[in-house]
Image (cartoon, rainbow, N blue to C red):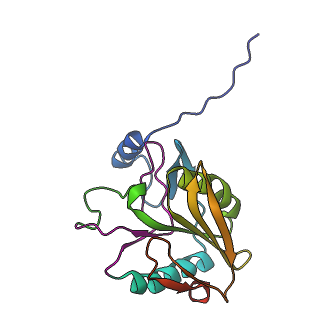
Amino acid sequence: MVAVFPQKHLTDIAEWHRMGEAGIFSPDSRMELIEGEILHMAPIGFNHAGHVNRLNNFLTLLARGKAVVSVQNPVQLGDLSEPEPDFLLLRPHADFYTTRHPVAADVLLLVEVSDSTLGFDRNQKLRLYATHAIPEYWIVNLIDNCLEVYRQPQDGDYLEKTVLSKADKLNLCSLPEIQVAVSDIL
């Protein structure tokens, strides 16, 4: 007897968009396409939501005129992934990305606010973002109350990894004139 194993059906962005347009998913569903797999996301808790609001409030002021702010919106990474990071700073675009989703080359900063998804954000998402050369990836780590900063993507990882506390400050690598006090976002 030959063993038969269940097989995954991986999908690409074109099929993902067709499924959305066909109304296959309920309007309140929270899902991402990561490396061809449709993943259900956990509901957003109040602490997570509040930290996303804080990032949005603070970094929008600092980036005004220098970047497009995108909150919990898709970014297309190749043909198999369309995550919805918590916060993005994107290269300025005349139409504010109304004619297409941003792609990796548009991203200046990508931020995930993380509590229940910390392991996923440190592993699968980190590899995904590094593989697509996202220049700067932050994890607002709500478990350990710190900011994890990842820079210099190479071969599916980041060469520079720094953990910062509320007492620290940093400048963005793509927008070095912007300095952030970690206490403002934690």
Residue 70: image location, x then y, percent: 40, 70
Residue 32 is left or right of residue 139, and the answer is left
Instruction: State the predominant SS element of the stretch in magenta.
Output: loop
What's drawn in magenta, residue-wise?
65-94
Quarter of the image where the N terminus is located: top right
Q: Would you say residue 114 sits in the magenta stretch? A: no
Quarter of the image where the C terminus is located: bottom right
Question: Is 179 located above or below residue 20 in the figure?
Answer: below
For the image shown, how many numbered marks are present on the structure? 0
Pick the residue in front: 133 or 124: 133
**Residue at the spot x=59%, y=79% of the render?**
46
Residue 131 is left or right of residue 95, and the answer is right
Residue 104: image location, x then y, percent: 43, 56
Pick the residue in front: 41 or 85: 85
Residue 55: image location, x then y, percent: 51, 80
Question: Is 43 located above or below residue 4 in the figure?
Answer: below
Splitting the image into 4 quarters, where does residue 103 fall? bottom left
Query: Farthest residue toward the top?
Result: 1
